Image (cartoon, coloured by chain):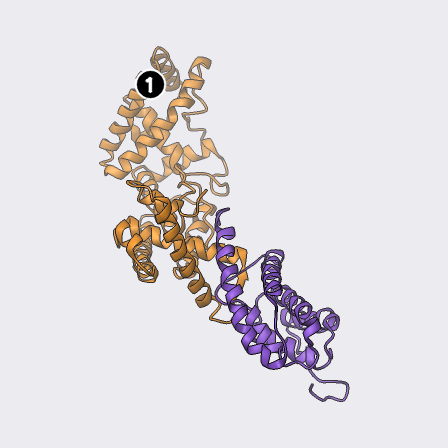
Chain colours: A orange, B purple
């Protein structure tokens, strides 16, 4: 992989020519040399290769964010004799993202899932650590904090630093808002059916709720009940067994839309639920021939 | 860091180092010490070998010219063993920079090496590397005070 890949990726409308890459690489070295000098406070002309790599990735990430959010454009990047100014502009973009991240964290505090889960609580504490320890200047691409709680839809590993964290927070906020649409008692009963130790295990709280809501919408039942009885599952199996892949996909998408409409979900939340429904398709396809959908839809056990 | 990054950077730095060493020769000639063109190339190659072996990367002027300027007035360095001494000092520098976990600045380490080399080590590179620098790094890591005096409590 070429070192300039992250930047090219952002300006992929027109890939950099070889000359442009060489010119940019030279400027990146100069920037790295200066950054290393700042980092060691001028006390050391050399650093470990691992440290240089971290500093370099941070520079690339900062410039990438600047490009992505329009602080400067490709022409300015290539024309700049010194990237220091552009780096500063990239940092300003990241600073704004950090502020946005803090606001998202506050929103999550104000809209908690309302269900006890150790990994969820630890992750919120880990995110506080992130905002305290996040180093925009030297390690902007790093995520200094423990994020253990599993989301229904994982944040892509390609995302780095504050971008990863903000995407995580946005998704967590969507999941929390979704869970809060249902009675806590019913959510707890549903979670107990899927995992008796739902408080202590590293599980996602949103997914079982979303899947059962979609299942109930498929059956034209009350989605707020959250319980899919054995009879309902039989009915689901018999109604879905004749469907091909396209038909199943359409039905799941319609159910997700129905749930979103009933919950008055905004566009990001509706997209998120659609994604959950889409991911159900291979699981249902696999289980339909067995005549059971127990592994997908849940029945209250208590 | 990508595979292409280090070799290209190193090639660029080698050219820089060679021209810096040529300039440095002008300074060290006053002390009767100079490197031939071949020696300059050898020392430069060894610089990058030492960096590679110690897993370090260096920017800017690097440590080589600073080492040369610091040690050129040592009474224990002669023209005949100048190149060999510089090569060993350079290796020692990067090795002990790592061993001290980067807690010692370049200037401090060079100053310490020079004081010891001219003092207790009396020009012995083995003594410098085997005892004095090991002790310095151990003390840096574990926080003991460095005793820079001889058995009579006198400083070197």
In this rendering, position of residue A73 left or right of residue A233: left
* Residue A66 visible (yes or no): yes
**Image height of B44 relative to B125, above or below:** above
Q: Residue A219's spot in the image, x, y percent?
A: 30, 20
Residue at 43 percent across and 63 percent down: it is A35
**Image height of A198 relative to B101, above or below:** above
In this rendering, position of residue B50 left or right of residue A38: right
Q: Quadrant of residue A220?
A: top left
Q: Residues within 10 Å of mark 1 (few under 14, many from 20)?
A: many
In this rendering, position of residue B27 left or right of residue A292: right
Q: Residue B124's spot in the image, x, y percent?
A: 74, 74
Q: Observer-nearest residue: B117 or A151?
A: B117
Residue at 32 percent across and 57 percent down: it is A90
Outermost residue on the top side: it is A242
Q: Observer-nearest residue: A186 or B153?
A: B153
- Element type at mark 1: helix
Residue at 29 percent across and 25 percent down: it is A253
| Residue where numbered disc 1 is placed | A248
Q: Residue B105's spot in the image, x, y percent?
A: 55, 72
Residue at 41 percent across and 61 percent down: it is A30
Q: How many marks?
A: 1
**Image height of A238 relative to B43, above or below:** above
* Residue A113 visible (yes or no): no
Q: Quadrant of residue B79?
A: bottom right
Q: Quadrant of residue B48?
A: bottom right
């Amino acid at each position: 992989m070429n070192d300039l890949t992250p930047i090219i990726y952002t300006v992929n409308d027109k890939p950099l020519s070889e000359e442009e890459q060489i010119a940019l690489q030279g400027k990146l070295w100069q920037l790295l040399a200066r950054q290393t000098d700042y980092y060691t406070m001028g006390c050391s002309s050399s650093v470990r290769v691992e440290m240089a790599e971290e500093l370099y990735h941070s520079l690339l990430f900062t410039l990438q964010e600047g490009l992505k959010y329009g602080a400067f454009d490709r022409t300015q990047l290539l024309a700049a004799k010194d990237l220091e100014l552009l780096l500063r502009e990239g940092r300003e973009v990241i600073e704004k993202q950090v502020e946005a991240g803090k606001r998202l964290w506050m929103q999550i505090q104000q809209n908690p899932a309302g269900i006890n889960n150790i990994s969820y609580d630890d992750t919120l504490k880990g995110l506080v650590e992130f905002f305290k320890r996040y180093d925009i200047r030297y390690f902007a691409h790093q995520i200094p904090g423990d994020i253990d709680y599993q989301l229904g839809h994982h944040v892509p590993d390609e995302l780095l630093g504050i971008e990863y964290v903000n995407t995580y927070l946005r998704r967590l906020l969507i999941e929390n808002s979704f869970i809060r649409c249902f009675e806590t008692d019913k959510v707890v009963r549903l979670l107990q059916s899927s995992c008796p130790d739902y408080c202590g295990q590293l599980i996602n709280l949103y997914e079982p709720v979303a899947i059962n809501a979609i299942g109930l919408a498929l059956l034209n039942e009350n989605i707020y009940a959250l319980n899919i009885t054995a009879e309902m599952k039989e009915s689901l199996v018999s109604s879905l067994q004749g469907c091909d892949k396209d038909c199943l996909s359409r039905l799941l998408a319609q159910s997700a839309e129905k749930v979103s409409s009933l919950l008055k979900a905004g566009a990001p939340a509706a997209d998120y639920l659609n994604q959950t429904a889409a991911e159900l398709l291979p699981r249902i396809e696999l289980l339909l021939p067995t005549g059971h959908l127990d592994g997908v839809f849940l029945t209250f056990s208590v | 860091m990508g595979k292409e990054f280090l070799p290209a950077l190193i090639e660029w730095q080698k050219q820089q180092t060679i021209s810096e060493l040529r300039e440095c020769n002008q300074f060290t000639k006053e002390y009767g010490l100079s490197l031939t063109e071949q020696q300059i190339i050898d020392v430069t190659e060894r610089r990058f070998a030492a960096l590679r072996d110690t897993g370090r990367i260096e920017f800017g002027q690097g440590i080589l010219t600073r080492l040369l300027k610091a040690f050129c007035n040592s009474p224990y360095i002669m023209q005949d063993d100048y190149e060999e001494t510089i090569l060993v000092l350079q290796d020692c520098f990067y090795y002990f920079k790592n061993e001290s976990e980067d807690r010692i600045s370049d200037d401090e380490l060079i100053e310490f090496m020079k004081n010891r080399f001219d003092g207790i080590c009396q020009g012995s590179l083995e003594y410098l590397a085997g005892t004095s620098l090991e002790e310095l790094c151990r003390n840096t890591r574990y926080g003991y005070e460095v005793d820079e005096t001889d058995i009579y409590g006198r400083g070197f």
